[in-house]
Image (cartoon, grey):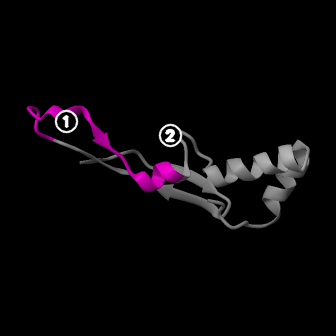
Amino acid sequence: MYNRNKKTIITLNGAYIVLERVRKCSNKDCQGNSIAFKSEDLQRITLSGRTFCLDVILYVGVLRYEEHKKYDEIIEKLAQSEKPVIF
């Protein structure tokens, strides 16, 4: 088991600093030694290596492609208020 580096994730509810704990077999003779088990919860809300969570990506996509908002309008909407997390 080991901890990954601290990571900042940004959701519609705000920014959070997370520390993911990864589990891995420490027995060198184990066939599964090369397999790392990462947090399912973290992977459910964000893409690997990305800062913005899926709720933000989805919200921006809806604003842009369904409501036809321009870049400045999207930035304004994001800054206005906290939105509920979309899952």
Q: Quadrant of the C terminus?
A: bottom right
Q: Is residue 87 one of those drawn in magenta?
A: no
Q: Residue at x 11, y 35 (%)?
A: 30
- The spot of residue 13 in percent (x, y) is 65, 65
User: What amino acid is labelled 2 in the image?
Assistant: Ser
Q: As rendered, which of 13 and 39 lies closer to the eye?
A: 39
Q: As rendered, which of 49 and 64 lies closer to the eye?
A: 64
**Residues in magenta?**
26-44
Asked whether the residues under the numbered discs 2 and 1 touch, taking CB atoms below 8 Å apart as contact, a structural biologist would say no
* Location of residue 34 by image quarter: top left
| Label 1 element class | helix
Q: Residue at x 66, y 60 (%)?
A: 86
> Which residue is label 1 attached to?
32
* Location of residue 26 by image quarter: top left
**What is the crowding at mark 2: few (fewer than 14 residues within 10 Å), some, or many (at least 20)?**
few
> Which residue is label 2 attached to?
48
Alpha carbons under labels 2 and 1: distance apart: 22 Å
